[in-house]
Image (cartoon, rainbow, N blue to C red):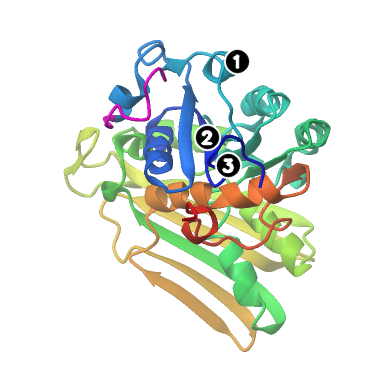
Amino acid sequence: MKTSGSDRSVVNVIQYGLGSIGMACARAVAATPGLRLVGAVDVDPEKIGRSLARLLDLPPKGFRGIAVRASLAEAMAGRDAHVAMHTTVSSLGAVVPQIQDCLRAGLAVVSSTEELAFPSRTDPEPARRLDVAAKRARRAAIGTGVNPGFIMDLIPIVASGASLGVRKILVRRVLDAGRRRAPFQKKVGVGMAPADVRRRLAEESMGHVGLLDSALLIAAACGIEIDEVRKSGAPVLATRPMRSALGRVARGKVIGLRQNLSCRRKGREVIRMEMVMVLGAKDPRDESFIDGSPRLHLRWEGGVHGDAATIATLINAIPRALTAPPGLHNILTLPIPRTFSPLLSPQP
């Protein structure tokens, strides 16, 4: 792992994007032995120019002279950095220029962009451009997170390794949206009129981004051929007044979503993805079913907390991004995830 300066065990990180996940990532970077936060980029005028320590509510020691900047060039001016922690938006098209800038600056990239999870299958031309940019820069870039990147793809892929003659893989995620932050509740339509949510679901401008990426990752890893993909989604309505982070939700208004994706081969369903994101969801859980020999059922009681696990997967991807061959990677082209701390903690 390439570092510089007297402490060769420390990796210098630029935080690119300071939304709610980006802020939490920046705090996690600052708290992780072996990582040093050396700069931050965001487009929010209310954040640009502010002291990073004050913005993150952290002690100023170690952050003197570090402020949020509007561009990567400004954030890196006079500073040595090794990796960009990229947490901006879900759209691949929107992040291509941002990631190209990071690669040209000599940074490896770890991104939370959902559409970067498996773009070689879902959007090959932008993926090709990023792969070329990464190879020219002799750096690696990876899109990952908890979903896609872990719970609905990597886990069932690994589980399938203990079964023969797999006929179908079912992955189900049930989330209590009431335990999640306000932006998540807004993403799943909490408080909206049902007709508006149905319209936005039909336009694919609302809901979870990444079900198709996860399904295609499973198919590619397990050698499952697909010739048809069917998507469906519907709002879930309140049967009584409810409270949310966005305010009171009246009876008949939306309290969340159900989203399904079915992958078929010659008319037979071979992969199914189900996602429920609802205020007060009963029996929240993450589970995978492998229909093979033997049949397997993996279940996480209470489910995996999305925000905390997303931050962990991003932090834990840093060593793999720094040591991977140049190019655009996904969870199938890198070693399996593992915890960061033993790999990069400072040596005595």
Q: Amino acid at mark 3?
A: Glu
Asked if the stretch drawn in magenta spans residue 318, the answer is no
Q: CA distance from mark 3 to mark 2?
A: 21 Å
Give the farthest residue toward the bottom: 294
Do the CB atoms of the residues marked 3 and 2 lie less than 8 Å apart? no
Q: Main secondary structure of the magenta part?
A: loop
Q: Residues within 10 Å of mark 1 (few under 14, many from 20)?
A: few
Identify the mark nearer the N-term, 3 or 1: 1
Residue at position x 25%, y 54% in the image:
280
Report which residue position mark 2 lands on.
Answer: 13
Residue at position x 31%, y 45% in the image:
180
Identify whether 305 is placed above or below 158.
Answer: above
Give the number of callouts: 3
Q: Based on the displayed image, in which of its 4 quarters is residue 246 positioned? A: top left
Report which residue position mark 3 lands on.
Answer: 114
Identify whether 308 is placed above or below 222.
Answer: above
User: Residue 251 location, x and y as percent?
Assistant: 21, 42
Residue at position x 68%, y 27% in the image:
96
User: Residue 293 location, x and y as percent?
Assistant: 66, 88
Q: Amino acid at mark 2?
A: Val
Magenta stretch? 57-66
Identify the mark nearer the N-term, 2 or 1: 2
User: Residue 10 location, x and y as percent?
Assistant: 52, 43
